[in-house]
Image (cartoon, helix red, strand yellow):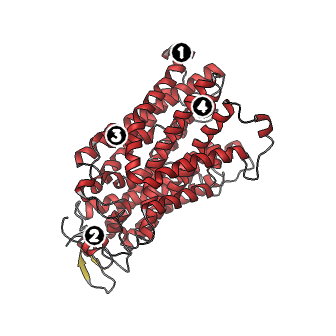
Amino acid sequence: MSAGERASATLSNKDLAPTRPEERTWSAWHIAALWIGMSVCIPTYTLAAGMIAQGMAWWQATLTVFLGNAIVLIPMILNGHPGARHGVPFPVLMRASFGTRGANIPALARALVACGWFGIQAWIGGSAIYQVACALGWIDLGAEASRVTALGVTPWQLVSFGAFWLVNLHFVWHGMGSIKWMESWAAPVLIGAGLALLGWAVAKTGSFGALLGGGSRYPDGVTFWAVFVPQLTAMVGFWATLSLNIPDFTRYARSQRAQVIGQAAGLPTTMTLFCFIGIAVTQGTIIVFGEAIWDPVVLISRLGSTPVIVLSLVILSIATLSTNIAANVVSPANDFSNLAPARISFRTGGMITAVIGVVMMPWYLVGNLGAYIFTWLIGYSALLGPIAGIMLCDYYVVRRTRLDVPGLYDPKGPYSYRNGFNPAALVAMVVAVLPNLPGFINAATNRTHAHAALDAKVVPVFPAFCDTLYGYAWFVGIALGALVYGLLMRGPGRSESVTPNGSRRSLGPAA
C-alpha cells in the first residue's frame, strides 16, 4: 500500500508527501551551492569577526570555525540520509520518534527558531538597503538621528526592512523551484564578492603578513578557553537548526552520494573560507580604522566610493536573501504545514514565518552581540541539541534506518504510540534540556559570573558551574537526548509501538 493510499488529510498534503522520482533533481552541485548560498551571509561574517572583537588571534578564530563546522557536518549528513532514502521532510520524519501528533513539538521548536532567524536576516538585508539609500543621499542622516521610534529604530530603517521583507515573500510564493534557481545562480557571485573584500583588506594593509600579524588580545582576566568554548558551541549552534531539517532538502537529492558529497564540499569549506575573510578583514579594520569593525554593512559604508558602496551592499543583500530563503523559510513552512496539512500549505506556512519574524523584533538581537551569541545562538542550541540526539538515536539505533513510510501518514499506524505521542521522546527531550536551563537563565538575565566579575551589582541566579555547562549546551543536549531516548526505547518499545487502544503494533518493515 502506498503512502498516498494510507495518508490521512490530517497528516498529509502535496508539500508533505514523499518526493516522487521525477522530483529528485538536485545534484551534488545543487546541494553544495545551497550551502554556499546559506554560508555566505552577514551573520556568518559577524560571528567570526566577533571572535576577533573578543580577543582571539586570527588562527584561533579560524580553527574554532573549522572545528565547529566539522562537528555539525556529522549530524548534517546523518540526518540527510532519511531525506534522500525515504523522500520525507523533517516534520514527517519526526513522527517516527515523537509520534504522529507529538512531531509537532520539535517541528514548532524548529519553526520558531527559524522565524527568529528569518527576522534577523531580513533586518540585516534591510540595513544594507538603508545604507545604499544613505550612500546615494536619499536619507538625511542628521534628521534621521532624531526620529527614533518607540521600537528603537528610525522610520527609514523600518521602511528598508519592509522592502527587503517583501522581496523574501516573492520567493516564498514561488516555492522550491525558485529557491533552487536562486541558490545556484548566487553561489559563484557571493564567493567572488567575499574574495574581493579580502583583496581590499590586503591592499590597504600592504600584505597578508601585516593583515594576520596580530596575536590574541584578551581583556584582563579572560583566557582563551573562556572565549573558545562558548564560541565553539555558538558555531555549532549556528547550523543546529539545519542539522535537524536537512531532510527538507536532501529529499530532492538524486542519490545518497549527491547529498553526502554536496554537503561535505559545501558546508565546512565555505564556512571556513568566508569566516576567514570576516576574520582577516576585521583584523584589517583595526589597522586601517583603529577599531575592530565586525559588521560588514558598517564597514562598507565607510569605504568612501559611492559606486563601490552601492555595488557591495547590493551583493550583501543577495547574500542575505539566498541564506534567508533556504535556511529560514523552507523548514518552518513545512513545520507549520504539519500542524494542519489540509489548511496550511508550504506557501501559507512561509507567510506565517515572515509575520512572526517581524513580531520577534530582530533588531535587538542583531544590535546586542552578547544577546546574539550567548542568549540566542547557544540558547536555542540547548533546545535543538536534544531533538537532534533523539532523531539520530531513533533512526540509526532503534530503527536501523528502516521506516514504514506509508505508516508515517497514517494516524492509526505504527507511529501513533499513545494518542499520537511517544512518551519516551517527550521525557528524553525534557531531561536533556533541563541541565542547560540554569545557565540560560543566567545568560538571558545578564547575571552570569562573567558579568558579575565586571559589575559588582550583578548577582548570578545560579552557580558558576551552570555557566560552564551552558557553554557546552548543544553537546550536552545531543548526548543526553540520545542516551535517555535509547534507554527508554529498549525492550518492547524498540520493535513495536503502543496504539491508542493499548494493543501492540510493529514499527514496520524497511521501506
Sequence-first disc among 2 and 1? 1
Q: CA distance from mark 2 to mark 4?
A: 48 Å
- Verify CB contact (< 8 Å) between mark 1 and mark 4: no
Q: Tell me the element at label 4.
A: loop
Q: Position of residue 286 (x, y in %)?
A: 62, 23
- Image-quadrant location for residue 244: bottom left
Residue indicated by mark 2? 490
378 and 128: which is toward the camera:
128
User: Could you tell me if residue 488 is visible in this image?
Assistant: yes
373 and 440: which is toward the camera:
373
Q: Position of residue 459 (x, y in %)?
A: 70, 53
From the viewer's perspective, is the residue at label 3 or at label 4 nearer?
3
Looking at the figure, which quarter contains the N terminus? bottom left
Residue 218: mark: 4
Residue 32: mark: 3
Which amino acid, by three-letter code, is at mark 2?
Arg
Q: Position of residue 454 (x, y in %)?
A: 70, 42
Q: CA distance from mark 3 to mark 2?
A: 38 Å
Q: CA distance from mark 3 to mark 4?
A: 36 Å
- Verify CB contact (< 8 Å) between mark 2 and mark 4: no
Q: CA distance from mark 3 to mark 1?
A: 30 Å
Which amino acid, by three-letter code, is at mark 1?
Ala
Q: Tell me the element at label 3.
A: helix
